[in-house]
Image (spheres, helix red, strand yellow):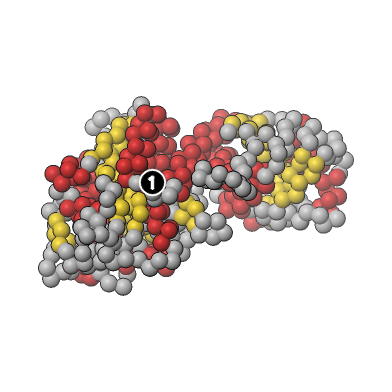
Amino acid sequence: MKFQVKTGPASRQRTGCILLPVYAGGALPAATQDADRAARGLLRKLIADGDFRGETGQTLLLPKVPGLACPRVLLVGLGERKRYDRKACRKATRSALAALGRMPVAAAVSFIGTEPARGTDAYRRARLTVECWHETSYRFNRHKTRDIRNPAPKLRSLGLATDGEAAVLRRGIRHADAIGRAMTLARDLGNEPPNICTPDWLARRARELARQHRKLRVQVLDEARMRRLGMGALLAVTAGSRQPARFIVVQYRGAAAGKAPVVLVGKGITFDTGGISLKPGPQMDEMKYDMSGAGTVLAVMQAVAELALPVNVVGLVPSCENMPGGGATRPGDIVRSMAGQTIEILNTDAEGRLILCDALAYGARFRPAAMIDIATLTGACVIALGKHRSGLMGNSDPLAGALLAAGEAVDDPAWRLPLDAEYMELLKSPFADVANIGGRDAGTITAAAFLSRFVGDIPWAHLDVAGTAWSTAPQKGSTGRPVGLLVEYLLGH
């Protein structure tokens, strides 16, 4: 897909389709006024006759409008002018691009971004447009052999109109295109079936990334190396699976060697049955998404390399399956983590924190400026926050604040939950240093409290994306979140 900056009036654009904004009540932005004059008032007449109301996200396709150089016009509703903000802009743009993707056109020009929206500037609107295109054009049909009812769009070129901020728009396009491709990678990884997306397959994908980007270095640790490192918690989770675990280390150096890196840790359970504490059958197929944290980390590393950001970043992916079997870990077993702490495993379905605690201990070796883990960790987070916001906890107010701000800027929001010392009391074990669950109360928080034992004084944040990493309706699939949030954080880092 080619994104371009376009200048010149709407009426003279020679392309397959132009996207023209209209406010509710019939107010026409400058670009739409220009097209209306060329069409001798046809657009105003349609609006006056009630054929188009301009509600947010409403679209109307007009073929062969007289006086215009292009064969199609798509009117796009922005809603009320006084209420037009970033969210309304995103909704209108998403709707318009989804409609555009269903048309038999190869090229189009959008004038939606020429209209100011509260909470945006030209850069942000350019980013928003390109990110929306990647979102709406995404398809995962690789395992379908027939009856593809939702084919890929035919559009190959999308122009973003401007009246004088071309350099700003090009910067926004560059950033958004890298983020969009990264989110596509995260979605592809998440949507792959678990018989294909195994820990070893993820490791191979990481190596492919390194071959594509010279600044990425990848190391993959096998179970023998993990055993020598003392990763007893991670190895306890993989004990029941025939698939060997892999610990993936991806390093990017964009700053001086002595500059402390940001370490990203992604939960990589490629399928989660719950182990001996077996999950109920309904929706268990969705447990292929339990590696969404891992997919996020690999995707962010791709975006960082494509954008050549002047930071040092380390991505860590502890990856395995959680399966029942004769060798599987049992409730009541006690294991020793890489950090030397003993853990009583009261529930084998609380496995994500077990692989993460060893990964966090490994991450501390890099003496990071900040460490962020991303995990589909608790169903309790879905109950608390639903599908809109990710859960955020941590030991650093500046780091948490920066992540919250990044999420708001890209409409990938999170919500901070408390992490008071009192929650740690729920994890006490009479037989080990700590238990891996704390009961029904505050399940999302006690999971983060467990992880906090393994980070020391490193600024650390935990993103629980159990509710946001994939959707079940209206169409099941990976969302690619929180790739946008994390790349936005690194752009500002």
Residue denoted by label 1? 197
Q: Where is residue 311? Give x, y as percent.
A: 34, 35
Label 1: few (<14), some (14–19) or many (≥20) C-alpha neighbours in 10 Å: some
Q: Is residue 237 visible?
A: no
Give me the residue at 15% from left, 46% from top. 227
Location of residue 345 with respect to 370 vertically, above or below: below
Q: Is residue 35 visible?
A: yes
Q: Nearer the viewer, residue 8 or 398?
A: 8
Decide if residue 299 is on the left or right side of residue 419: right
Decide if residue 17 is on the left or right side of residue 333: right
Q: Where is residue 385? Give x, y as percent.
A: 44, 64
Q: Nearer the viewer, residue 326 or 61?
A: 326
Q: Where is residue 284? Give x, y as percent.
A: 41, 61
Give me the residue at 71% from left, 48% from top. 76
Q: Nearer the viewer, residue 198 or 327?
A: 327
Query: In the rendered view of the protein, which quadrant contains the N terminus?
Result: top right
Query: In the rendered view of the protein, which quadrant contains the C terminus?
Result: top left
Give me the residue at 31% from left, 42% from top. 200
Residue positioned most to the top: 214
Q: Amino acid at mark 1?
A: Cys
